[in-house]
Image (spheres, rainbow, N blue to C red):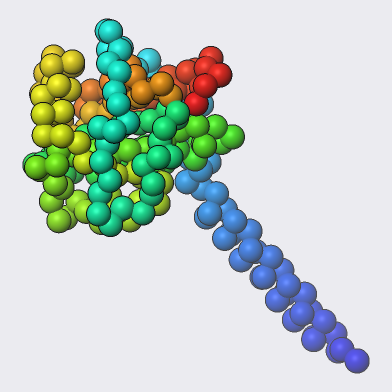
Amino acid sequence: METGEETDLRRQRKRHGLWIFWLIVLIGAAPWLGAWYLVKHPGLWGKPGNHGQLLQPPQPLSYELFQSVPGAKKDLKQIRGRWVMIHVIVPGDEPACRQVLDNTRRLHPLFSKDIPRVRRLAIWPEDRPPVAELRPHLFEDRDLYLARVPADFAARLTGWIGGPLRCGQLFLMDPLGNLMMWYDAGFDPYGLYRDLKRLLKASRIG
């Protein structure tokens, strides 16, 4: 039979265990809650309304353009018929590459039930692979698809946007394979989120 001291000690342990449990829950939820708050209060992250630029006309792409990368874990067939956020990996601009990849990685879970409709893809010219220091950031990202593209594709992109390619830029491809919007380096990640949410709501494909 328990003494009074033993009963008090058991209750204290139980309360301590509950406190640890809720602390772990809070720590796990904090990044998502922070991202949700920034979406609801976009003025706290960059300038509100800082959205992408339309490509006029949209540029149709063949999925055959995207070639598999040795060591990549995700099947490129899974980007077909989806909305695709495309990162162009530009050598010499690795910090910007890591930043924009981190931004879209954090945004992706916010699409909730629409997550299967949205893909993240990093591409680079077949003759200019990413440097060694960036490879872990690419190959260890569980949600990121990887592809090589022909060497002349960068020149085509440059012509479409009327300026040089930078790693902090992002392109948006619709489910029909049309490159239809782009975001310049330094863009507001939550402007991208709001644009894509509107497109997902309006579209019945992808």
**Measured along the vertical axis of the image, is residue 21 above or below residue 79?**
below
Seen as rendered, the residue at the extreme bottom is: 1
Closest to the observer, 30 or 144: 144
Q: Residue at x 47, y 18 (%)?
A: 199
Q: Is residue 53 visible?
A: no
The image quarter in which residue 173 lies: top left
State the residue at coordinates (82%, 82%).
7
Q: Position of residue 53 (x, y in %)?
A: 29, 14
Q: Is residue 161 left or right of residue 16?
A: left
Q: Residue sitting at 59 percent across and 56 percent down?
A: 25
Please say whether residue 176 is visible from this viewpoint: yes
Residue 126 left/right relative to 138: left
- Counting from the top left corner in percent of width and height, residue 33 is at 53, 41
Q: Residue furthest top?
A: 56
Residue at 91% x, 92% y is 1
* 52 sits to left or right of 6: left
Whole-percent x, y for residue 80 in the image: 41, 32
Count of marks, rendered view: 0
Nearest the viewer among 124 and 45 is 124
Outermost residue, right direction? 1
Residue 167 at x, y = what percent? 18, 35
